Image (tube, rainbow, N blue to C red):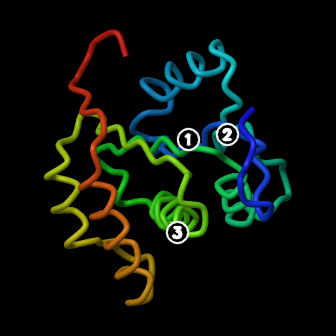
Amino acid sequence: MASSSNSEFQDTYDIFLSFRGLDTRNKFTDHLYEALKREGFQTFRDNEGIERGENIKSELQKAIWNSSMSVIVLSETYATSKSCLFEIQTILEHRKKKPDHIIFPVFYEVDPGKIKEQAKKLDFGEEKATVEEVEGWSAALKEVANMAGMVSGNQSNG
């Protein structure tokens, strides 16, 4: 497990895994999570890292702050999830406080250009979001879409 250079943060996790469950949980993300575990990485993912009855946003924020690295699996509908957008914005805010926090984007069956387009027109249908929230999420999504990462095509073996 990594140690933090900033005493404000304790690296409980090596990796925080951000993903849209509907797109990738039972495919790519499960394979990635299991591979990271086999290699000895303490990896946070939402379905195992949050206890029932806990405040989800607070627990996600705490997990991000207490991770050395974030892997963001961007997929076709990642930008339609307010929870995913909260995670990506929190990850970027955390890196401002802890510059050695590594962010590695994975573009799963989606081109980075498509993510940039989605960032321009975030739409949540009937769900409400403030202008400030949407602007922050859009900026965060654009920033991550511009990062060097891995572009994954449609692979039959996951």
114 relative position to 85: left or right: left
Give the CA separation, mark 3 to mark 1.
Answer: 19 Å
Which residue is disc 2 drawn over? 44
Which residue is disc 3 drawn over? 96
Give the residue type that dot 2 points to.
Phe
* Quadrant location, the C terminus: top left
Q: Residues within 10 Å of mark 3 (few under 14, many from 20)?
A: few
- In the rendered structure, find residue 91 and report the number of the disc placed on it: none
Q: Is residue 156 above or below residue 28?
A: above
User: Residue 115: which quarter of the image?
Assistant: bottom left
Q: Residue at x 43, y 23 (%)?
A: 27
Give how far across and how far down residue 60 sits, in percent: 67, 57
Give how far across and how far down residue 62 sits, in percent: 73, 59
Which residue is disc 1 drawn over? 17
Marks 3 and 2, the one that precedes in the sequence:
2
Q: Residue at x 65, y 12 (%)?
A: 38
Give the residue type that dot 3 points to.
Lys
Q: Is residue 134 above or below residue 155?
A: below
* Quadrant location, the N terminus: top right
Q: Residue at x 32, y 43 (%)?
A: 75
